[in-house]
Image (spheres, helix red, strand yellow):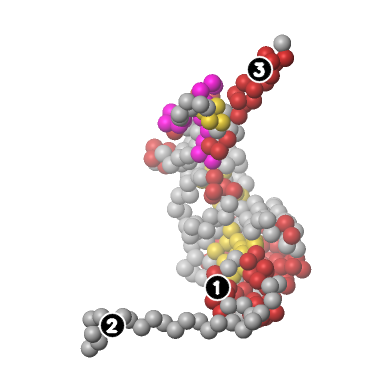
């Protein structure tokens, strides 16, 4: 047994890199980098470039997000995904408006084992194109289980039914999840990776368009059995509170006026600090627009602050 004073042996340090070569720890960190960082390392030096370009594991998950989205075309996407050499599993394209149906279909043809395909707000894609892609994966015995299609052009109920049918045939475990989806600004505008449903969009019962369809957070509203009487619908059909996600009546919209462009129910409106001049609050997403006043806890909204500055300048002119 070692003496009590003996210290545990420390692991040997990583060997020092040769002059001009990157540290070995950089190669270990490559697997944790996002796409912009990988592309930057690709250009640092020859050794890092070869490591990034030659390791197919780094390219099994490709996620293109703003501000890189606007620069990605069909050709660039094909070059990026070609690094996976047919082993691509997850492709996230957020707002890639320059990617077309043909370009995405070509990528899927070369990577038929894709299981996640996230293409929200890719306005260059269409419902017909997405159906062709899912059909191709089904014919190649694919196992796609997650699709994100919010913002795809010309998506209809027929497209959605065909896609769901093909996904269920290819993977019997995939069933349309009817669990409630509650509104928040992140779910509306940004890719929500915590959503475990196979498809993010649904048919709005009010306008019949294929969009994100939100349920109400109020228990009384969810208990209503008739689908047309429930306040379940898309962002455009039902106004929802920016804080709690509940539906907002026309009376609440009149009484609970905000200093920003969003909406809030009366219950949440009462709990928020308000502008000292117009008695209107900001929602949490726009609290950075508050103009603090000299008294602690007091603020002015931007409109009142600009109005006050304008009045002061007019008084100085007399």
Q: Residue at x 47, y 25 (%)?
A: 295
Q: Residue at x 58, y 35 (%)?
A: 289
Residue 29: give x, y in percent of width and height: 55, 73
**Most common SS among magenta residues:** loop
Residue 30: give x, y in percent of width and height: 58, 73
Q: Is residue 280 above or below residue 63?
A: above
Q: Which residues are magenta?
A: 269-285
- Queried whether the magenta region covers residue 134, the answer comes back as no
- Queried whether the magenta region covers residue 279, the answer comes back as yes
Callout 2–callout 1 Cβ contact below 8 Å = no
Q: Which residue is mark 1?
A: 29
Q: Residue at x 62, y 77 (%)?
A: 22
Q: Between tags 3 and 2, which lies in front?
A: 2
Callout 1–callout 3 Cβ contact below 8 Å = no
Q: Residue at x 56, y 31 (%)?
A: 291
Q: Residues within 10 Å of mark 1 (few under 14, many from 20)?
A: few
Q: What is the secondary structure assignment of the residue under circle 2? A: loop
Q: Which residue is mark 2?
A: 6
Left or right: residue 131 compared with residue 195? right
Which residue extends farthest bottom? 1
Q: What is the secondary structure assignment of the residue under circle 1? A: helix
N-terminal of the pair, mark 2 or mark 1, is: 2
N-terminal of the pair, mark 3 or mark 2, is: 2
N-terminal of the pair, mark 1 or mark 3, is: 1
Q: Is residue 297 above or below residue 40?
A: above
Quadrant where the N terminus is found in the figure: bottom left
Residue 265: give x, y in percent of width and height: 47, 32
Q: Foreground: 211 or 29?
A: 29
Q: Foreground: 152 or 269?
A: 269
Q: Is residue 117 above or below residue 149?
A: below
Q: Which residue is mark 3?
A: 311
């Amino acid at each position: 047994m070692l003496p009590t004073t003996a210290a545990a042996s420390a692991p040997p340090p990583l060997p020092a890199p040769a002059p001009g070569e990157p540290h070995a720890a950089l190669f270990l960190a490559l697997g944790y980098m996002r796409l912009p960082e990988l592309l930057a390392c690709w250009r640092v030096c020859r050794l890092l470039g070869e490591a990034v370009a030659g390791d197919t594991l780094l390219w099994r998950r490709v996620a293109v997000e703003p501000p890189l989205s606007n620069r990605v075309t069909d050709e660039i996407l094909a070059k990026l995904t070609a690094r996976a050499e047919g082993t691509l599993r997850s492709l996230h394209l957020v707002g890639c408006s320059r990617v077309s149906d043909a370009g995405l279909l070509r990528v899927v043809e070369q990577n038929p084992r894709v299981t996640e395909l996230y293409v929200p707000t890719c306005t260059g894609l269409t419902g017909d194109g997405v159906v062709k892609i899912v059909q191709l994966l089904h014919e190649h015995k694919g196992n796609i289980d997650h699709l994100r299609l919010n913002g795809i052009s010309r998506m209809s109920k027929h497209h959605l039914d065909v896609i769901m049918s093909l996904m269920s045939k290819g993977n019997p475990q995939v069933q349309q999840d009817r669990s409630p989806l509650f509104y928040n600004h992140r779910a509306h505008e940004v890719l929500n990776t915590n959503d475990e449903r196979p498809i993010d969009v649904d048919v709005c019962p009010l306008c019949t368009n294929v969009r994100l369809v939100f349920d109400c957070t109020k228990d009384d509203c969810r208990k209503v059995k008739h689908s047309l009487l429930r306040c379940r619908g898309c962002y455009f059909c039902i106004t929802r509170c920016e804080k709690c996600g509940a539906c907002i009546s026309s009376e609440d919209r009149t009484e609970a006026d905000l200093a920003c462009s969003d909406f809030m129910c009366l219950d949440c409106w009462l709990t928020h600090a308000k502008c000292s001049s117009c008695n209107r609050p900001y929602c949490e997403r726009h609290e950075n627009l508050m103009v603090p006043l000299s008294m602690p806890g007091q603020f002015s909204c931007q409109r009142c602050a600009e109005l006050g500055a304008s009045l002061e300048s007019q008084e100085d002119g007399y």
